[in-house]
Image (cartoon, grey):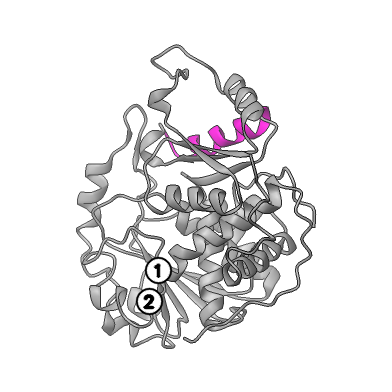
Amino acid sequence: MNLFGKHLLCTQEWSVDELEAVLSLAAEMKKDRFSAKYTSLLQHKSFLMFFYNPSVRTRQSFEAAATELGGHAQYLEPSAMRLKTAKTAGEINEDAAHVMSRYGCGLGIRILEDKIQKYGDGDKFLREYCQYGTIPVVSMAHDKFHPCQGLADVQGAREKLGSIKGKKLLMVWGSGALARSWCSVQESLLINSRLGMNVTLAYPQGYDLDPEVMADVKKNCQAAGTKFEITHDQVEAYRGADIVYSRNWVTPQAYHPEKGLQKAQEIEAALKYPDWITDARKMKLTNNALFTHPMPVDRGHEVTDEVCSGPRSIIYDVAENRLHVQKAIMALTMSKFDYKPSAKPQRVAA
């Protein structure tokens, strides 16, 4: 499968076969992590990482991925670069994209809700780099999507459950003090609906997600012959779930026309729903569900410690899988690796 040079901004823009190739290769890379088959795929090449927002897992996992593929990851901060903004003169996106393409084999960009003026600006920013650059651009999380997280979510679930087709995913809003982006949530809904899961989305009134993305999730489920439902009854939503994904996210009114994200107001509003927390009582309504979260976890608000650190939690497995899916993405899009998918999802002891 030839994916060389392909951008990854959202899994919805890749075919299912392409996504399965990434997941298959990621499983092989995890099983045989330091195999000579992989350790020179990016030899002498640099992967440029453009961070508007800080991270723990994202920077570490991409740097480790580049190293394990024989390459180098270069950390870039906008504050240390002369880039044009609304208030300062500097290099425009077109010029920066062209120049970066002369230096690296790929470009990762991370730009979240607090670094943009309105929802969609981050996605637009990445697409400009795709338009003007000549190297693959990978979203390391932006305001709309987080494709690497979505792939890692799937890999973690399959390792425990085997096939996820026909299983129920509960995506449930959680109270929290962080005012989080929609990106991880929307990505998980998109990829899991494409791969055959029944999807239930539960949240308090007023916390609707992107209607265009939700329309795509609905179409994905229709194409797969599965169910997609939205409910505001969180207790009933847990019944029969096979995977519970609890996450805080902001309201559609989170962005001020001039000031951008109104984080303090969003946090204050979110904390008015303390009962929207994943706890042991609600988990007992599930089909012995796995608990997952993209991290960092707001313990005590989104989920209790009992569940988050319990035997059905796969948060650390999913965090590890960020490394493996990102290695697979980089190998397939940034090297001439001739990969022929063959492996089935690997299941480990649940």
Which of pointers 1 and 2 indicates the residue nearer the eye?
Answer: 1
Residue of label 2: 313
Q: Which residues are magenta?
A: 118-132
State whether residue 45 is above or below residue 166.
Answer: above
Judge by depth and name the residue closer to the eye, 47 or 107.
47
Separation (CA) of disc 1 from disc 2: 8 Å
Q: 10 Å neighbourhood of mark 2: few (<14), some, or many (≥20)?
A: some
Residue 30, above or below 216: below
Residue 171 in view here = no
Q: Amino acid at mark 2?
A: Ser
Q: Is residue 103 magenta?
A: no
What residue appears at the point 27 percent right and 47 percent down from the top-left corner? Answer: 266
Q: Amino acid at mark 1?
A: Tyr
Quarter of the figure that contains the N terminus: bottom right
Q: Looking at the image, can residue 87 be seen? A: yes
Residue 34 sits above or below residue 140 on the image: below
Foreground of the two, 290 or 143: 290
Q: Quadrant of residue 193?
A: bottom right
Q: Position of residue 218 (x, y in %)?
A: 60, 64
At a point 23% along the width and 64% down the height, the residue shown is: 301
- Write down the residue under mark 1: 316
Residue 19 pos. (x, y %):
67, 61
Residues 66 and 206: in front is 66
Residue 233 vs residue 191: left or right? left
